[in-house]
Image (tube, helix red, strand yellow):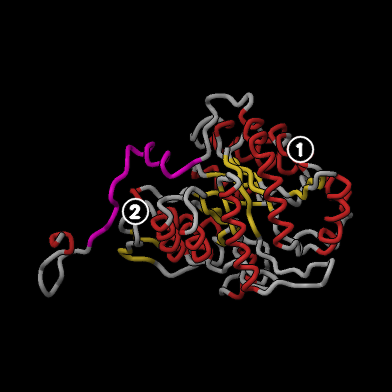
Amino acid sequence: MQLGIFTVGDVTPDPTNGTTPTEYEKIKNTIILAKKAEEIGLDVFATAEHHNPPFASPGNPPILLSAIAAQTEKLIVSTATTLITTNDPVRLAEDYAYLQHVSDGRMDLMLGRGNTGPVYPWFGKDIRDGIPLAIENYDLLHRLWREDVVNWEGKYRTPLQGFTSTPRPLDGVPPFVWHGSIRSPEIAEQAAYYGNGFFANHIFWPASHTEQMVRLYRQRFEHYGHGDADQAIVGLGGQFFMRRNSQDAVREYRPYFDVSPVYGHGPSLEDFSSQTPLTVGSPQQVLERTLGFRDYVGDYQRQLFLVDHSGLPIKTVLEQMDLLGEILPDLRAGFAEGRPAHIPDAPTHGARVAAAGGAHDATVYAGADAATGSRAEDAR
């Protein structure tokens, strides 16, 4: 079981004092947060991708994730999410394979359609094509990481003839891919078809909706022959705000909840907490509710929490991380208790290389130079 945090990178005024961090402060604080995640023993840090205010999350996540990988030793860096709809699959193949090398394999990525409508025309796309774009673009990305030379033709980009994406995947094993979704069964189907992971965002909708989406993915995973339904690779989002005393947590968090760009200006804190997985209370309440996710999705592989949004100052966020660190051993023990032996662990690069029969150099060397007749590998 992998435990971690993710950020949406929103630059939101602190409603208690009116101060707003600069983009510089938000970006630097994100790196501090990732390093804190490793310090307290978390496994994963993930960043969203945005291209518009009020977000300072990167438009090109590998830049931030490379910086974090360089300043950590064990932390897996990931995305939450990478926009498979508006990014060119060729660029995604190059950028994330490069990140795979830079991080020594300590990375994976989550693909999603994104929830910001205007981003589509900004990149020359039509939001009405969101699902077919996600399907076609991932088909190409999948091939680019597995075929040294790709000939491809689709509807939404120019054809490729004899194209080789570089660098090739580290050790000959492509990055692991999660397909993230809040509401789209087509994305659960896509994840199941390829035998990839399915990440249910799980921060907006009731547990019954998440249960339905995960069940569909598991059924289709088994249908496509990747294993039994309970062996499908599932991740969940989540969110909390903790204080030692639950009343203090509710009192302190309420003004931030009310203005949140993620879910504010709607239901009350109490209604939202009762209808979604948001938990505002004591560490014990967060522990018990999080472990309860297994009751409706089964044993799963990754749990990420959103902790730094809605204008919360970095001091408060780091305090939240300390409290999370205190219950982390109990979270791990709780998720391990009663977990059947046939349930797979969360995917890691090392485990996937071993499953592939070991590492190999996947570098594609150039052919003979037209002027000299020599080849690059002959000079080694």
Residue 336: percent from left, percent from top: 61, 29
* Residue interval drawn in magenta: 347-365
Q: Residues within 10 Å of mark 2 (few under 14, many from 20)?
A: few
Name the residue located 82 percent from the left edge and 58 percent from the top edge.
Answer: 257
Along the line of sight, the residue nearer the viewer: 234 or 319: 319
**Does the magenta-highlighted stretch encompass residue 363?**
yes
Residue 171: percent from left, percent from top: 34, 48
The span from disc 2 to disc 1 (Cα, nearest Å) is 44 Å
**Does the magenta-highlighted stretch encompass residue 336?**
no
Along the line of sight, the residue nearer the viewer: 145 or 36: 36
**Residue marked by disc 2:** 147
Residue lying furthest left in this view?
373
Name the residue located 71 percent from the left edge and 56 percent from the top edge.
Answer: 317
Q: Secondary structure at mark 1?
A: helix
On screen, residue 157 versus residue 168, left or right, reads: right
Residue 288: percent from left, percent from top: 75, 35
Q: Secondary structure at mark 2?
A: loop
Asked if 192 appears above or below 319 in the picture, the reply is above
Q: Give the amino acid at mark 2.
A: Glu
Check the picture and name the quadrant holding the N terminus: top right
**Residue marked by disc 1:** 289
Name the residue located 61 percent from the left edge and 68 percent from the top edge.
Answer: 27
